[in-house]
Structure formats: structure tokens, C-alpha cells
Image (spheres, helix red, strand yellow):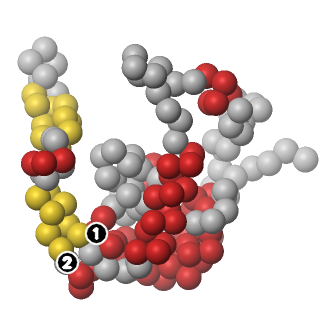
Amino acid sequence: MRAIQILSNLLPELRSLCETTTACSAGKWRVRQERIPAPSGGDWCFSTINGNPKRGNGILNNEIYVGKIVWNRQRFVKEPDTGMRQARPNPEAQWVIQEAPELRIIDDDLWQAVKARQQENKIERDDHGRANVSAIKSRRRPKYLFSGLTKCACCGGGYSAI
């Protein structure tokens, strides 16, 4: 529920940010600047905000913010060789969805704008699950190995070379 409180404070900015390419970066910077801890208690990372649209996790995909609670989205299978649990998605027909309008903090227009943006940025895969390499390479990538990975110990901000 703490994440919902954080999001409701950021909503005015999220509305304008969702139309720009730097929405996630700017949102992440804002929560770091205000020293708001991530839901796990650590730093905010890319997957906390973006998540995975297929799995429905991450702030931009969590339907609880539009007033829907979804159960049975996945099941766990124990791997016999390693003993580790593996998450497996359930078919959408098996999902249990309950309306919870009291939990809604995002209106449908903003939700649809985010979904449209995600669809624009999606990289299609062929029948064998391979992505188009040229589409991936055309995206902005760091020029150096440690770009974006070093952080200031005091404020959590990134370093940049001058």
C-alpha cells in the first residue's frame, strides 16, 4: 500500500511524463531525489517502474492502480533437478479479476496512454522467439560498459563524464 501512496503523490507528474520518452527515468529521478525508498526498501530500478507487461508486474502494469485485483496470474512449479520454484503463467481464462474501485488512483485515460506507449516501444519477435536485431541496436544504448551503473553514495545520483 505504501507504493500506492507514493504513486498518488507522483500522479500529476506521471500524467505529463507518460507522453515523453524519459518518463521512467524522470520518475525514477524524482523518487530518488526525494529519498523515497522503493517498495522493497532499496533503490528504484528500471523493472520496479516498467516491470513486465505479460506478467502484469511493475508500476506501469499493475492493474490495482485502476481498481482491479487479479489473482491466479501465475503458478509455481518445482524444478525436480534443482528443487527451485519456477513461475509459469496461467492462461488468461483462469485469472480471477475482482473490481476494487476504492483502490483506483489512475484514470482510464492515463492507463490507456501508458499501454499505447508500451505497444509503440514493443519489439516484435518472429515465430522462433528471436527479436529483430536492427530494431534493438537502433535504441539508445550506453557507449561505455559502466555507463549508468555508478552512483553517488550520498544522494544516489548517477555520475557523468565531462
In the rendered image of this protein, does residue 24 appear above or below residue 128? Answer: below
Marks 1 and 2, the one that precedes in the sequence: 1
Residue in view at x 11 percent, y 31 percent: 77
Tag on residue 100?
A: 2
Residue in view at x 13 percent, y 22 percent: 79
Q: Which residue is mark 1?
A: 64
In the rendered image of this protein, does residue 13 appear above or below residue 17? Answer: below
Relative image position of residue 114 (x, y in whole percent): 50, 62
Residue in view at x 24 percent, y 82 percent: 101
Relative image position of residue 102 (x, y in whole percent): 24, 85
Q: Is 128 left or right of 13, judged from the image as shown? A: left
* Residue 116 appears in the figure: yes
Q: Identify the image quadrant of the N terminus.
A: bottom left
Quarter of the rendering containing residue 155:
bottom right
Q: What is the secondary structure assignment of the residue under circle 1?
A: helix
Q: What's the distance in space between the residues labelled 1 and 2, CA to CA? A: 8 Å
Q: Confirm or deny contact between disc 1 and disc 2 (CB under 8 A).
A: yes
